[in-house]
Image (tube, grey):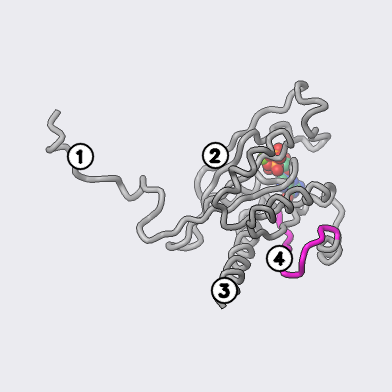
Amino acid sequence: MDYADSDLATAGPRATDMLLPHGARGVKIVIVGGFGVGKTTMVGAVSEIPPLTTEETMTQAGVGIDHNPGASGKNTTTVAMDFGRISINQELILYLFGTPGQERFWFLWNGIFEGALGAIVLVDTRRIEVCFEVITRLEDRRVPFVVAVNTFPEAPQYPVDELRTALALSESVPMVTCDARDRASCRDALLSLMVYLCTLAAQETV
Ligand SMILES: Nc1nc2c(ncn2[C@@H]2O[C@H](COP(=O)(O)OP(=O)(O)OP(=O)(O)O)[C@@H](O)[C@H]2O)c(=O)[nH]1
Ligand SMILES: [Mg+2]
């Protein structure tokens, strides 16, 4: 075949196939939290592309090893990561990475945190204790984060100040509530992270 005459040889990549539109900046954001807090739900709710998920069915083989969903109706769990994308505007595109929640996959977190500009720590108020390990790992890696309380209807509700104290968070770390199933709510949580990152960046340049 004569490639010199081929459209494919001369046209280059199509704009729609390119990872980033010309002039745009991609930013890596991680959604992290314990088992079943709604990470996969959040990535799927807010992503403008069909999300990449790595869900596997939980079976009897995991009894005594994995967290059990109990009566929640959740029967799958993330075994590697979730991936989605949302364009804030023409210049800023967020690449969203959801972490696995089962502890035997936590070794993957450090790789997923690599190069992340910021993170959302998703919290279920029924299991706040998981957040300590999550927050420690983010602090060790110097990844700034906001805390988003996913408001499950059956979960107890606490005033933000009480949660802040329970999590030993400084006043500067933003805390928001969200519904991980709701696109607008997830977008708002991401925007609060973006605003926080801009504030931190401005402080560094002073
Ligand atoms: N009522 C309610 N249910 C939710 C909410 N967020 C998630 N869920 C449900 O709770 C379950 C947990 O969702 P996942 O998104 O799989 O949680 P995850 O954190 O990704 O779980 P792992 O990856 O297994 O750690 C799903 O059945 C969701 O439909 C919420 O805000 N409210
Ligand atoms: Mg998941």
What is the x, y in percent for residue 43? 60, 47
Q: Which residue is mark 1?
A: 9
Specify which label sits upstream in the sequence, 2 or 1.
Answer: 1
Q: Report how far apart the C-alphas of labels 2 and 1 lie in the structure.
A: 30 Å
Q: Nearer the viewer, mark 2 or mark 3?
A: 3
| Left or right: 84, with 163 as reference point | left
Q: Secondary structure at mark 4?
A: loop
Q: Residue furthest front?
A: 140
Q: Is residue 83 magenta?
A: no
Are the residues at dot 2 and dot 1 in contact (C-beta closer than 8 Å)?
A: no
| Left or right: 62, with 113 as reference point | right
For the C terminus, the image quarter is bottom right
Q: Secondary structure at mark 3?
A: helix
Confirm whether residue 100 shows in the render: yes
Specify which label sits upstream in the sequence, 2 or 3.
Answer: 2
Q: Amino acid at mark 4?
A: Pro
Confirm whether residue 152 shows in the render: no
Residue 202's label in the rendered image is 3
Specify which label sits upstream in the sequence, 3 or 4.
Answer: 4
Q: Nearer the viewer, mark 4 or mark 2?
A: 4
Residue 117's label in the rendered image is none
Specify which label sits upstream in the sequence, 4 or 2.
Answer: 2
Q: Which residues are magenta?
A: 166-179
Q: Which residue is mark 2?
A: 52
Q: Which residue is mark 4?
A: 174
Front-most of 68 and 72? 68
Q: Amino acid at mark 1?
A: Ala
Q: Nearer the viewer, mark 3 or mark 4?
A: 3
